[in-house]
Image: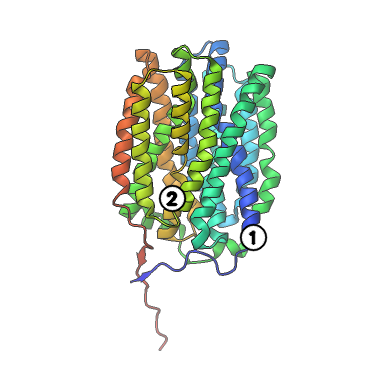
Amino acid sequence: MSAAPTANPPSPALTMTQVLVCGAAIVTLSMGIRHGFGLWLAPITMERGWTRETFAFALAIQNIAWGVAGPFAGMLADRFGAYRVLIVGAGLYALGLVLMALSTSGLAFTGSAGLLLGMAQSGTTYAVVYGVIGRNIAPEKRSWAMGVAAAAGSFGQFLMVPVESWLIGHWGWQNALFMLGCAALAIAPLAWGLKEPKAAAHTGHQQSIGAALREAMAYPSFRWLMAGYFVCGFQVVFIGVHMPSYLRDKGLDPQVATTALALIGLFNVFGTYTAGVLGQRLAKRHILAAIYFLRSITIVIFLLVPVSPMSVYVFASVIGFLWLSTVPPTNAVVAQIFGVQYMSMLGGLVFFSHQIGSFLGVWLGGRLYDQTGSYDVVWWLAVALGVLAALANLPVREGPILRVQRPQAVTP
């Protein structure tokens, strides 16, 4: 038995600055655009005459499509390089936004806002970018670099939500989607900065795709990470999509929701960066457990205090600090355990669990609201799941997986 070999290639194909600048810009666009989708719930459902469940179901499909396509997008990025996957993802992103604006039926809306945008996000977000980071940045700086990329995605949320709100208010929700479609195309030229030489995608421990998948799924720590990430998806997507309508129901001005979503993005810049830095010094399983537990406490306090603009802003700031701070330590643990040869694929696989949670969070939010007239059940479910996720991450083993080295045949 021997530990997995060193997870970084001996001579990085791309410079750290190049990877971080281009990767961060891509994540800023892809995550920033999607973070504001909750702002479209009210105008679209009112103009089309749809229920909230119709809108929520489409975004639920978006999240599950993202999750299903994620391992395949990661597999292609590991095999052929992230550049090609990012180009296709940018095209799908633009097409999905345009068709989302033109959809006049629930089925068409589900196909565009759901299926197309979900596939687009699988090829333009963390798993693909983190694969490039893992292959080109040394292990001692990897968690920090992932924190930088995640912080960029958070800055995109902070930047894009007010922009999207302004576009909707001044140009209408359809024209706003057309403009975002044009913005998504900017991912394509940025992808050039992540184009690796072919040899860079095949460094490190050589293993077949099937063997890598079987190894990961059979490893208990990987399954615990997937369980925690399921809860992460449930919580953040439910809050991101349904909080604007929740606050509207409480009688608050729509601008409060816009400011709250922007605050989530702003404070998540600090949260994700902090998580990345702490991941170089502390056990990542402890960081993850603390994040999930603190989320539950934050939601409980928010539900128990009277709703006001100030309570919303405080909640958004605290939950924002914890928002995507799970991303750097989770992906760093995956690289630490399995190495970086199939990091995009394995990152996409663990993210699939995240997206199952996202599907349930956004869909149950709409479903239970239409049935009960309230979001209370889903809020408290998010609290309970957060406690379970904290406990699930504690048994995770962070060391490199031990692999049996088969003896080579001796030539007589």
- Horizontal and vertical percent position of residue 223: 34, 49
**For the point 57% across and 60% down, which residue is it?**
136
Residue 408: quadrant of the picture: bottom left
State the count of labels.
2
Q: Secondary structure at mark 2?
A: helix
Real-space Cα separation, disc 2 to disc 1, in angstroms: 22 Å
Inspect the image, locate mark 2, and give the three-letter code of the amino acid beneath it.
Answer: Pro
Left or right relative to 97: residue 402: left
Q: Circle 1 sits on which residue?
A: 15
Point out the residue furthest to the front here: 310
Q: Quadrant of residue 361?
A: top left
Circle 2 sits on which residue?
A: 329
**Earlier along the polypeptide chain: callout 2 or callout 1?**
1
From the viewer's perspective, is 394 left or right of 72?
left
The answer to which of 372 and 409 lies nearer the viewer is 372
State the mark number for residue 267. Answer: none
Q: Is residue 265 above or below residue 5?
A: above
Q: Three-letter amino acid code at disc 1?
A: Thr
Dividing the picture into quarters, in which one does residue 281 lie? bottom left
Q: Residues within 10 Å of mark 1 (few under 14, many from 20)?
A: few
Residue at figure coordinates x 53%, y 45% from the top left: 150
Residue 287 visible somewhere in the drawing: yes
Q: Identify which residue is drawn at 36% across, 62% down.
A: 401
Q: Position of residue 377 (x, y in %)?
A: 32, 22
